[in-house]
Amino acid sequence: MAGKNKKKWKNPFYVLLIPAGAVFCVTAFAYGFMAFQQVNAGRSAALHNVDHPLHTWLNTHGSKAILIELAVLAVLTIGAITTDSWWASESKDIEPQINTDER
């Protein structure tokens, strides 16, 4: 029963992948929405959102931000895959001490 009570360490790359993936999803959605508006919107709708700070920032830095976030996701994914077996093997034995003198 000693093998059942081992605590597995959590891979920190998995913990970092969640917020990095969420930030990438939000940025990609906002950038895609901005690009869709620029291509398909009429002149009045396009001019309405041109001065919005997010629209301006995405228009200037959106491509670079998505590429950087994609690179971060790639590094974290590779890190998670390559260190997964190491983190799974690092475990502590948390089995409680059983007093065998009590009978």
Image (cartoon, rainbow, N blue to C red):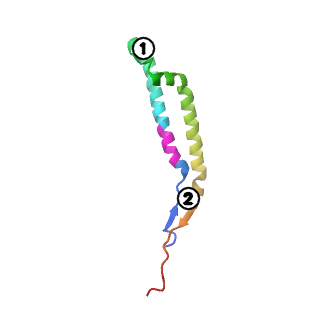
Secondary element at tag 1: helix
- SS under mark 2: helix
Number of on-image labels: 2
Q: Work out whether 4 lies above or below 27.
A: below
Whole-percent x, y for residue 12 in the image = 54, 51
Q: Residue at x 52, y 60 (%)?
A: 8
Horizontally, residue 100 falls left or right of residue 86, namely left
Amino acid type indicated by mark 2: Ala
In front here: 30 or 101?
A: 101
Which residue lies under the disc numbered 1? 47
Identify the residue shown where x is 39% and y is 13%: 42
Crowding near the residue tagged with mark 1, few <14, some 14–19, many ≥20 C-alpha atoms within 10 Å? few
Q: Position of residue 30 (x, y in %)?
A: 45, 28
Query: Which residue appears at 48% of the width and 81% of the height?
Result: 99
Asked whether the residues under the numbered discs 1 and 2 touch, taking CB atoms below 8 Å apart as contact, a structural biologist would say no
The amino acid at mark 1 is Leu
> Which residue does the numbered mark 2 point to in the structure image?
88
Type of secondary structure dominating the magenta stretch: helix
Instruction: Identify which residue is drawn at 58% across, 37% down.
Output: 71
42 sits left or right of 83 in the view: left
Residue 63 location in percent, x, y? 55, 27
Q: Which mark is residue 65?
A: none
Estimate the spatial distance between the alpha carbons at disc 1 and disc 2, rounded to whole Å. Answer: 54 Å
**Magenta segment boundaries in residue numbering:** 15-22
**Dot 2, how many residues are within 10 Å of its Cα: few (below 14), some (14-19), or many (20+)?**
few
